[in-house]
Image: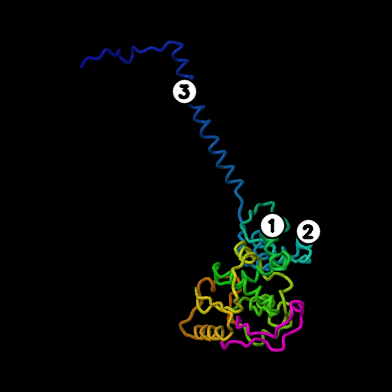
Amino acid sequence: MHQNTPPRGTIRLTRRGRLVLILLATGAVVAGAAVVVPLLTVRHGVEDAKPASLVIPEGWRASQVYDAVDKALTLPAGSTEKALAKARLKLPRDAAGNPEGYLFPATYPVTKKTTPESLLSFMVNTANKKFNGAPVAAGAQRNAMNVYQAVTVASIVQAEAASKADMGKVARVVFNRLERGMPLQMDSTLNYALKRATLKTSADDTKLTSPYNSYQRMGLPPTPIDNPGEEAMRATINPPAGDWLYFVTVRPGDTRFTADFAEHQRNVAEFNAQQNSPTQHNSPAQQNSPIPQKSPAQQNAPAQQKSPAQQNSPIPQNTPAPQATK
C-alpha cells in the first residue's frame, strides 16, 4: 500500500519544534526526578527515624525490667538499677521509691538518645496514666483500699491467674480472704521473696521470715510483686461476685475455685496426682513464662479468724497451711 509519508531524510523540524521537543524532554526528566527523589528521601527518612523497641511483658518483676533495659541499651549489668536514684520517678508516696508495680508492660521505643532514666520514667508515667484515672480510684475505694494497694492486688492476680478468664475470680478470692481476716497464703508472694518462679512450695518455705510471706503475715504484701497489665487491673477493680476462698489449677485450662475447704483438698489431691504422673509436663505457658505460676499452695487452709483491724498485722499464724505432697 502506498503511503504519503515523506522519506525519513526529508523530515525537518523548525526552530520552534526543536525547542518544544527539548522542553518536553527536559520536563520529563525533571518530572521523573520530582517523583523519584521524594520517594527516596521519604524511604531514607523512615529508615533513619525508625527506632528499635523494648517489649515489657505483663507480670515481669522490676529486676527483669532492669536487666532488659541494660541489654536494650547495651549497658553493663546493673546500670539501670543504679540509675533509679537519679531518675526522679513520679511514684506514689506508698511506694517509698520502689517502682515495682509501676513499670508498665508495653512496647517502648529505643533510640540512640534513650537512657535508663528516660525509659523508666516513660514506664512509670504510662502506669500513672493507666492507674490514676477515675475507674481505678473508684474500684479501689469500693474495696476499701487506695490505688497503690489495688496495684498490689493486681500484681498478685497477674502472678496467680492461670488465664485471663480466671483473673476476676482470683481477685475475688483475695478480697474475700482480706474481708474474713484470713491470710492470703499465696505462693506468688513467697516466690517473690525468694526471687524465684516455681510451682513447688514446701512447708519450710511457708516458715520464711519475710513481709512477703503471706502464709504467716496478714494483709497484703508491702509492695506489688510484679508489674501488672490492664487485664489484671480491670479484674481487680471489678471482680465478679462469689464466695470463693480457695483455688488450684489442677491441669492447664482447669482451675477450680471453691468456698469449701474439703472440696479444695480433693482438688489439691488431684493436682498432686497429676504432678506425680510420669507423663505430666508443664504447659508451654508455664515452661517459658517468667511469671510465677500458681501452685498447690492454694491449699489455703482455713486460718484463725481475725478482725479487719488485724488484717495488716505482721503476727505469724500459729498453724501454717498444710502442704500438698509433691
* Residue placed under numbered mark 1 in the picture: 134
Q: Earlier in the sequence, mark 3 or mark 2?
A: 3
Q: Which residues are magenta?
A: 297-326
**Marks 3 and 1, the one that precedes in the sequence:** 3
Instruction: Report if residue 68 lies within the magenta region.
Output: no
- Mark 2, residue position: 88
Residue at mark 2 to residue at mark 1: CA–CA distance: 25 Å
- Element at label 3: helix
Q: Is residue 66 above or below residue 8?
A: below
Indicate the amino acid at tag 1: Ala
Q: Nearer the viewer, residue 2 or 80?
A: 80
Residue mark closest to the camera, 2 vs 1? 1
Viewer-nearest residue: 120 or 174? 174
Q: Name the side, left or right, on which 155 lies relative to 289.
A: right
Can you say whether 289 is above or below 25 in the image? below
The circle drawn on residue 25 is 3
